[in-house]
Image (cartoon, rainbow, N blue to C red):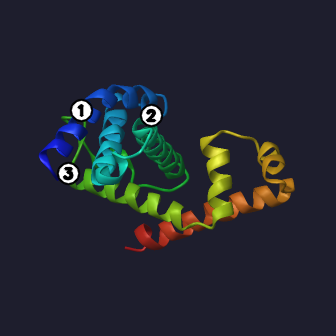
């Protein structure tokens, strides 16, 4: 990239980093997660900067990317609670209270896998899981919003969760 374009992005970064952080912080459980998501979002903006710099609302674009990443991370963490992970107490360094690098790498791999698997679900399964677990809507509210009967909503939700669970078992429990 040209020097002037790089300076332009640096200025955008400095002017928007804190704005994005404050928005994303509402979606995360920790300051570190929020910072990480903001940096990921800004890296995505940087990769497309040649095009993004022509947008009328560059900040809005960055906010949308950051919020989507925060929601996806929240959903991944929520879905992880459905799945059986390795017991943490066996993996933690008792003296330092830290997990080993191998454990950290495994968890990162599992989170990436889970995000990819969510994207592989059918659109209706993913939509209902998002509405139920991310937006905290009740099944009745989801059915009304999507014009579906309550048993259908529950069935689609359960089917999506079971697909994730089955794929999880195939990937991590048969090794």
Residue drawn at x 34%, y 30% is 16
Q: Is residue 175 visible?
A: yes
Gap in Å between the C-alphas at discs 3 and 2? 23 Å
Residue designated by label 3: 101
Pick out the residue farthest to the right.
149
Gap in Å between the C-alphas at discs 3 and 1? 36 Å
Give the crowd class for mark 2: few <14, some 14-19, many >=20 residues within 10 Å: some
Question: Foreground residue, 114 or 127?
Answer: 127
Which mark is drawn over residue 137? none
- The reply, left or right, for residue 157 in relation to residue 74 is right
Mark 3, mark 2: which one is toward the viewer? 2
Name the element at disc 2: loop
Label 1 or label 2, whichever comes before in sequence order: 1
Where 49 falls versus 137 (above or below)?
A: below
Where 105 falls versus 59 (above or below)?
A: below
Residue designated by label 2: 28
Residue designated by label 1: 11
- For the C terminus, give its image quadrant: bottom left
Label 3 or label 2, whichever comes before in sequence order: 2
Residue 53 is drawn in which quadrant? top left
Name the element at disc 1: helix
Q: Is residue 94 visible?
A: no
Name the element at disc 3: helix
Residue drawn at x 37%, y 29% is 21
Label 3 or label 1, whichever comes before in sequence order: 1
């Amino acid at each position: 990239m040209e020097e002037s374009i790089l300076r332009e992005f640096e200025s955008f970064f400095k002017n928007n980093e804190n704005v994005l952080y404050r928005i994303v912080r509402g979606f995360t459980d920790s300051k570190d997660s929020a910072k990480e998501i903001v940096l990921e979002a800004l890296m995505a903006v940087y990769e497309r900067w040649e095009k993004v710099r022509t947008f009328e609302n560059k900040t809005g674009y960055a906010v949308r990317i950051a919020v989507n990443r925060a929601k996806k991370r929240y959903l991944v963490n929520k879905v992880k609670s459905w799945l059986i992970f390795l017991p943490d107490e066996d993996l933690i360094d008792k003296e330092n209270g830290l997990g080993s690098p191998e454990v950290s790498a495994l968890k990162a791999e599992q989170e990436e896998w889970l995000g990819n698997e969510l994207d592989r679900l059918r659109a209706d399964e993913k939509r209902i899981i998002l509405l139920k677990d991310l937006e905290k809507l009740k099944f009745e509210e989801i059915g009304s919003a999507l014009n579906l009967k309550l048993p259908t909503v529950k069935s689609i939700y359960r089917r999506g969760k079971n697909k994730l669970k089955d794929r999880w078992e195939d990937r991590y429990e048969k090794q």
